[in-house]
Amino acid sequence: MAILEGRNLTVSYYGDIDILKDVSIKASEGLITTIIGPNGAGKSTLLKALYGLLKPKNGAIFLRGEDITRLKPHQFIGIGISYVPQLRSVFPDLTVFENLELGAWIFKKDRRKVTNAIDRVFTRFPILEKKKNQKAGLMSGGQQKMLEIGRSLLTDPRICLMDEPTATLAPKIATQIYQTLMDLKNEGITIVTVDQRVKQAFEISDYLYVLELGTNKVSGTKADFEGGLREMIKGWLD
């Protein structure tokens, strides 16, 4: 069943320029849903709309059938949804540990809960524990992305929205991030991601949506796309 759904979304940045036009998307519980498409197709805009960072002019967002369109972004954490933006969002002058502490602000008064949550992140990403006293801005891009993902998991979300989680990363590090997404799926967490590494994203995805010029072009399971992916998206396949 769909755990998160955007229905007939029309979204604009400046009021009269529609970036998304009547776009719909469903994310099934415990699966990886990936949004792909050429640059400028509206992929990141769709993810921001799903997280309440952009309010649709038309359409609505539903969580388990309940309309959450009017919620503010900070309220999404409380209903089990996290978001990792494409652009770096670590605090570069704070240590890794301090960045994680900030990510646990929603239950900051419960020190045991904060400690346990951070320990879980360190178990998932041992390199972060090794560098916990280092300023985040001095780490590699891949390590910063691990920190961003780890921070998004502190609140034990059931749905993770990730915008270009492997952008600018070396192939080896990108493979590690994809493995993390698979691990999260195996733990029952629903993943909705935007990705430009189409071939790699295709391998880990259960369901894909293709956007073009701000509209739904086609969607289907990985099996639906087998054999026809390259032809359908030639010209922007990485």
Image (spheres, helix red, strand yellow):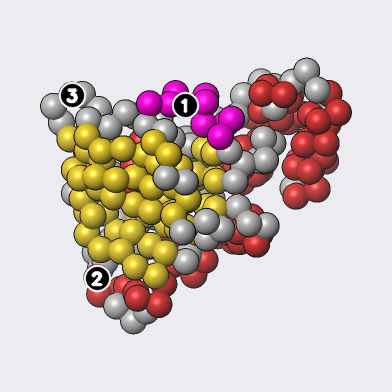
Among the 4 quarters of the image, the one containing residue 65: top left
Q: Which mark is residue 232?
A: 2
Q: Is residue 195 visible?
A: no
N-term mark: 3 or 2: 3
Q: Position of residue 180 (x, y in %)?
A: 64, 56
Q: Is residue 91 visible?
A: yes
**Quarter of the figure with the C terminus:** bottom left
Kindly check if marks 1 and 3 are in contact, taking CB atoms under 8 A apart as contact.
Answer: no
Q: Which residue is mark 1?
A: 73
- Give me the residue at 72% from left, 24% from top: 107
- Of helix, strand and loop, which one carries label 3? loop
**Left or right position of 70 against 149:** left
Secondary structure mostly taken by the magenta-highlighted segment of the chain = helix
The Cα atoms of the two marked residues, 2 and 1, are separated by: 35 Å
Among the 4 quarters of the image, the one containing residue 45: top left
The Cα atoms of the two marked residues, 3 and 2, are separated by: 32 Å
